[in-house]
Amino acid sequence: MSIWATFFDLEDNPPRAYEGSHILPSEKDARVDSDEAPSLAQVPSHITRDGRDNRPEDGKPWPWLRFSLGVEDQVLDRGQVAAVYEALGAWLRRTGGLPEGSVAHVSNEVLDDVLRRSGW
């Protein structure tokens, strides 16, 4: 049984397939299979090295994030997650901000702070 609990994925809106470094992506490009879409998972608070204990299931998750892309999984620590978060936020800001109707709830102040600290 896996200790990881997936809390986000793009299975309903999988990304487009990478066609190569010499090809400009297009809205018409084929999408990857939904089971290859990126996903994020965390280790819930009630998981311990020796199994479950009596901690509440709604507690703070362990400080590890599994980033899955197709069959490739990588485990990030909090510092790495923060760096990815800052880079993605800065990129969103440079390319026009959050998409209309986005479920992301990041304030402009946070994005501005990220941009200042990253040198953008």
Image (tube, rainbow, N blue to C red):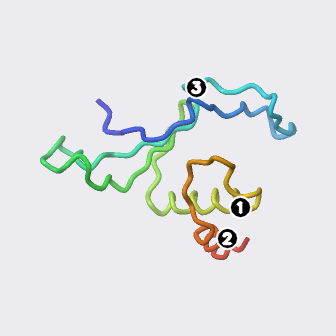
Circles 1 and 2: CB atoms closer than 8 Å: yes
Q: Which residue is mark 1?
A: 93
Please give the name of the residue rendered at 23% of the width and 46% of the height, measured from the top-left corner: 57
- Which-is-in-front pick, marks 1 and 3? 1
Q: Is residue 105 left or right of residue 112?
A: left
Vertical comparison of 11 with 52: above or below: above
Q: Amino acid at mark 2?
A: Leu
Q: Position of residue 20 (x, y in %)?
A: 80, 35
- Give whichever of 74, 84 is nearer the camera: 84
Label 2: element kind: helix
Classify mark 1: helix, strand or loop: helix
Residue 3, percent from left and from top: 31, 38
- Residue 34 tag number: 3
The crowding category of the residue bearing disc 2, from other C-alpha atoms within 10 Å (few below 14, some 14 to 19, many at least 20), is: some
The residue located at (70%, 27%) in the rendering is 31
Marked residue nearer the N-terminal end (1 or 3): 3
Where does the image place residue 52, in percent across and percent down from the top left?
A: 17, 42
Which of the labelled discs sits on residue 115, or is there none?
2
Q: In which quadrant of the rendered image does the N terminus lie?
A: top left
Residue type, mark 1 in image: Arg
